[in-house]
Structures are given as structure tokens and as C-alpha cells.
Image (cartoon, coloured by chain):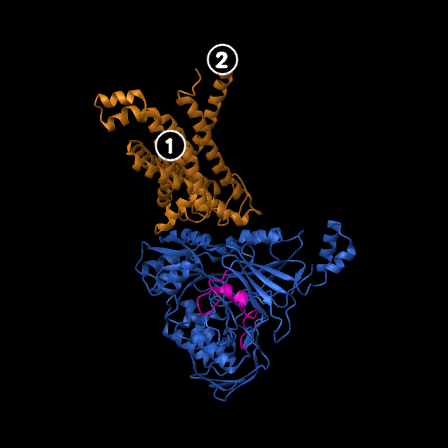
Chain colours: A blue, B orange
Amino acid sequence: MTTKTLLLAALLAGISLPATVLAQEANPDASIRIGSLYEPQNLDNTAGAGQGINEAFNGNVYEALFQLTDAGAVEPKLVDSYEASEDGLTYTFKLKPGVTFHSGDPLTAADVKYSIERVTAEASKSSRKKSLSTITGIETPDDQTVVITLSARSISLPYNLSYVWIVNDAATDITATEDGTGPYTLGEWRRGSALALERNDAYWGDAPTNGEVIYTYFTDATALNNALLTNAVDIITSVQSPDSLAQFQGNSPYTVTEGASTTKEILAYNDRVAPFDNVKVRKALARATDKARLLNSIWGEYGTLIGSFVPPTDPWYVDLTSVDAYDVDSAKALLAEAGYPDGFEFTLDTPDYDPHPIVAQFLQSEYAKIGVKVNINIITANEWYTKVYQAHDFQATLQEHVNHRDIVFYGNPDFYWGYNNPEVVKLIADSESAATEAEQTEKLTEANKLIAEDAASNWLYLYPQIVVSATNVTGYPVNGLNSQFYAYDIQKSE
Amino acid sequence: MTTEIITAPQRQRRPLILWAGLILVGLHVFAGLLSLIWLPYDPTAMAGGRLEGPSLLHWVGTDRLGRDLFTQMMIGSRIALTVGLGAVAIGAVIGVTLGILSAFATRWLDDALAATLDILIAFPTLLIAMLVVAASDTANLWSAIIALGIALSAIVARLTRILAKRVLVMDYITAARTSGSSWPKIVAIHILPNIWPTLAVNFALQFGLAVIAEASLSYLGLGAPPPNASWGRILQEAQGTVYTAPLGAIAPGIALVSLAIGVNLLADGLRDFIDPTRRAR
């Protein structure tokens, strides 16, 4: 396929054939330019940096004890071997020998302890903090051994540890610099435009198949697409609209792949405040939303309706689209039962980037049919973080949630949306202490159903994950799990 | 004789420009006024399919949500005219007042005002407007109008000051002053009637600027929030679909350009019509 396209391109461009064949060999020092819409706010994933930092740094600059592969499996990374005690409360990890940080310091058990405590610390803003709360102690009997003791079984400890960057304990401030163990080191970071990663020649594992990776950030999808069309970038990590694909399909020298996404577009209510503390109101809004139509408006033929916060790639997925299915009449009836026969009015804090403003208008139009007035308040991503995520100062908001297995957020009553159902909190907590993965899956499936019945939020749709690249670039991840983007296997021929 | 030869074709050309301007602006005024009492569709109703092309049902097609674009364009005309008129009115009141004050003021106050105005003018209109909008809590149509009005007032003030100063040195002003006329009276009887033709033309040009600036603000997300269908916002929303449904971006572009050209032609024609120094004799 690739060869064919290249041959065709060569013929069209009138280039002689041998040159093309030579050019097809991957350049081991190639500079891979990745176009993205998600610029990190800072470089520390425990300091509210946003999803962009995962895309740029996970697996590239920082590594964890375990790694979530692009296919969704959890594999040992910095761990050589590990074992759990019979009661599941003590885990002993042996670290891989010979691993060094970018600063030259060797990886020791103390670094691992420091890194885990960074995530669980009081000041940490990591969205995964709560999932590590069962850790009661971290012992370091020797430099290569870490013993973690838990207050309760935690079946997904290896999975959760895949989120914990292992940072050199000598590093003081990593919001603007880094000291990880990954195959790349931080190059130049120009805030607002680009972040460069350079190949770490002292890397302990297999060397990357390219020389450097440059993430270039755009604030709108059209500019991003144009960057690929004008050869200013080689890959765009997630296509934001089906309409732009027309430019890349067919006659152009581009590869389009569709993978599994974990990105969910949701209307999150502040479940603490009236009227959204009333389950009937939330259910009414869910029933008043024609999600099939919305998905078609935004994504055309792409994307999936899931009816809950759980995408099909999570083990506890069930199709819940029939819960609170689209039904305007019953929505009106529910509103009346809830004490709002004439509807009500609320402010929808809408991030200023696509698709949120258009989704907001869709909801505004839908809810007008049941007498609910939506005031759209456009805010920036930074404002969203401080106003909504931190201060919980909102009535309702739109957001795309990118994480894999993130239904556990509904088990945290202090999360920004403030959903608090003791039964769900217990199920999610119990699922962690399950002895087997089957038991964990059963509990989370149950929780998922309860959350859907409570219409805790309004889960609009699941994004498709579409990556487009120039055909001379191969080896990139195709799935959007956790918005990670492992760059070390990318090859580029020139 | 020579004058006759030069002015004769001008006499024919000028009314043509005035008419062209009147027609273009008139169309927008008509669409804007009509939108108050009648629209083809409810502007928020998702009446059609996704990105439909032009048809008898939807004259310029639909947007991603299936909303009728022609309806939005009509509302866009209304918003553009409202912003243009509002901004020019605010700019005129502040600008003319400041300009006249400056013309009458003592030397140092005049210098200070003139310097301030020059600094303000040095900033692009859009930048000042963005600052004002960003400083207000929530973006809405009024914050955009006020922001643009303030931005435009500097230009009006400087023009008024220069024009008023030119009149102030005239003999009849001295005569009026010696005969005991008060300052307000001099302004009302002598200054304003003498400077208004030039100001009026300037207002028309400012109107065009304000319309474009509002579209720019909306394009940047700083204008009236959705669902106010400003042309700038329609353009912005159509940007992602410009390859599959180009009309969504072309239509608001044409509307914007036609109104901007319309008011410029109108201003041009108007100048020849009302400015005695340019009127063909």
C-alpha cells in the first residue's frame, strides 16, 4: 500500500525510481513532527497539566513501573518481576537493573517511593490520586526492591501504577523541566507553540527509531489539518472533524487510521447544586437529548453512542444506551414531577474549542423544547480548570474525558461533578479489593449501571480515534487510550 | 469651459456610487428589519440535515446541526447593523465631545488630550476592543458594542478636534465671541454645522470598520455568545467544514463584504452629495 502510493507519487512528481527506493529507508535520525491540539499547561502530571502532558511525556520522557500498551494491556516496564502476597496486601517489586535517569542518576527504590508519594501527596492534583489511596506504606529494603503495603486489596495496582511517572527524587521542580528514564529527553519547550523531545542516547532499553520528536500545538482543528497538508507536521494525533478527512482520503499521500478511543464527550452537571441534585432533572435532560442526532452532527458516520461513561475497551462495558433513551414527552413529565413544570434556566460553561460550542448550541436547542433555558458561557481551558475543576463553581459544563478505566471518578464524591451515591462509592471501592479480575469486572459493571440509572452526567458520545499521517511516516500508535502517544517506534523515510 | 468637461462625467458617476451603496446597505437593513418580524425558520431549530447544500427549502443550505443558514444570515445582518449603529453612536458621542473640548481647551490640556488620542489610535481598533471585552465579565453583544464604540471614539475625537480648530480661527467666530455668544451657542450654531458633513462621512466609514471588527471579535469567540448568529461566528463554525460545505463559510463572507463595501460606497457618494466643497458646481 505504502509502496504503491509512493511509486505513484514518484511517477506523478517525475522523480526517478531509484531515488524513491532509497528514500523509503527510514532515517534513524529523522525528526518526527506531531501536530496536536492539546498543549500542556505545565510539565507535571500532578500539577494539572492537562491531557497534553500524557500525550507528550507518557512512555516517551517518563516511564512507570508498568506500561499501558496501545492495545490496552498492562505490561511491566521499569519492573523486572513482582509478586503479591496471599492476602493481596503486600506487593514486592524488583526493579530493572541498569536504568538511569536523564540526569545520570541510577534508578533506585527511593525514586519509586518518592514518585508514588508525589502522586498521593496532599498538594497533588493528579486525577488518579484516589486510586492509590489504599497504599499505606512503601518500603525500600534495598536499592532494587520496593515493597508496597495496602490497607485493602487493590486488584488494579499494577494498572494504576502505570500512571505514576517514575521521577528522580533529586529533581525539585518538574513543572518546567524533567528528569525521567524514558527514551527521550526534553528539548526546547516554547510555551504556546511547540515542545521538542530529543533522543536519549543513554537510554536503557531499545533506542527510538527516530532522532527527535516535536509536538506542535494548535488551537483549532483547521489550522492543524492545514499544517499536515502543507507538510508542517507529519502526523496529527486526533482528527477533530469528519469533514476534514475528505482532504486526506483518496488522492493524497496520507494514511488515515481509525482506532479505539477512550474520549467521551459529556455534559457534566454539578450534582451538588439545585436543580441538578435532583435525579429526575438529570434524567429528564438525558431523555431530552437526541444523542444519535448530535453524534451525526459532529462526527457524521464516525463515533459511538455508549449511554454511560464506560467505553467498549474497558472490561466493564455494557451497552446502556437504552437507559434514559431519547423521549421528549417523558422528559417533560419527569421535569414536572421534579417540580419544574415550566422548566428552569442554567449556565453551561463551555470550553472555547471545538466541538464544545457547537454541542452547547445543540443542547440549547434541544432543551428549549422542554422549557429549559441554557445560557452558554464560553470559557478557556485554563478557566475551566480553575473555575470548574478546582473551585467547583459551575452549574453544568461540557468536557471531553480522555482516560481509560476512569469510571472510578464517580466513586469520588469530591470530584468536580460532585456525584455522591454511597452504593456506587462502595461498589467502586469494593471492586478494588476484589480477589479476581472477574469479580472486579462484575462490581464495576454493577456500578456502571447504577451511575447510568442516576444519570450522574449526560454522556453524549464516544469519539472515534482517527490518526492521519504522511505515508512516509509509520509505526505510530493508533488507539487513543489515555491520550498516550508513544513516539519511539515511529519511522520516517525521507 | 474646462470645468464643465471634467465635472460632467463625475456628475453621472457619483450618483451611481451612491445608489450602489444605498442598495447594498438597503438589502441588509431590509433583511435585518424583516428578521425582527419574520424568519424562514426558528434560528435554533435543527430543521434540516447535516450540511445540506442549497435547495428551495434552505436557500444557502444548513450548518452541522441542520440549522437554516439563510435564517442565521438574516439575523447576522441585524446584529451587524446593531453593532455598527451602536458603536458609531457611542464613538460619536464620546468622540465629538472630547474633540470639541480639546479644541476649546487650554494649550496644555489640548496637548495632553491630543497625545492621549494619538496613543489610542496607535493601537489597532480590534486590540482595544478585545481588551475591553476581556475586562468585562461575560461576553455579550453590548460589551462588543461598547468596546468598539470606545475604540472608534479616539479617531472621531481627533478628527473633530482638527475640524473644530479650523473653524475656530474664522473671523465669524471672533465676531460671535465679541458679540457675547456663549461657548455652547458657538458650538451649536457655528461649529457643528460646519464640520458635520465631514464627520458624517467618517461615521459611515467607521460603521464599516465596526461591522468588520465585530465579526472578528465573534470569530475569536469574544463577541455575542451563541446562539446569536453573528457572521463572524458562523464563519468560525463553518471553518472546519469548509472543504465539504464551502457555502457555509462563503455566505457569511459575502454578507460581510457586501455590507462593508455598501457603507463605503454610501460614504463616498454621500461625501460628494453633502460636502459643498466637493459638490460639482
Of helix, strand and loop, which one carries label 1? helix
Residue furthest bottom as drawn = A86
Q: Quadrant of the N terminus of chain A?
A: bottom right
As helix, strand or loop, the secondary structure at mark 2 comes to helix
Give yes or no for residue A350 being in the magenta stretch.
no
**Which residue is at a point 51% across and 17% down the rendered structure image?**
B9
Residue holding disc 2? B4
Residue at x 56%, y 56% (from the top left corner)? A301
What residue occupies the far front of the structure in this picture? B108
The answer to whether A446 is drawn above or below residue B168 in the figure is: below
Q: Is residue B30 something that shows in the picture?
A: no
- The answer to whether residue A451 is visible is yes
**Circle 2 residues within 10 Å: few <14, some 14–19, many ≥20:** few
Mark 2 or mark 1, which has the lower sequence index? 2
The answer to the question of whether label 2 and label 1 lie on touching residues, with beta carbons closer than 8 A, is no
Q: Position of residue B38 (x, y in %)?
A: 40, 37
Rendered image quadrant of residue A236: bottom right
Q: Which residues are magenta?
A: A38-65
Decide if residue A479 is on the left or right side of residue A333. Answer: right
Mark 2 vs mark 1: same chain?
Answer: yes
Residue behind mark 1: B159
Q: Nearer the viewer, residue B228 or A362?
A: B228
Q: In the image shown, does A233 or B57 lie closer to the viewer? A: A233
Task: Tell me where residue B146 appears, x and y as whole percent.
Answer: 35, 42
Label disc, if present, on residue A143 of the rendered structure: none
Q: Secondary structure of the magenta portion, mostly?
A: loop
Report the amino acid beneath label 2: Glu
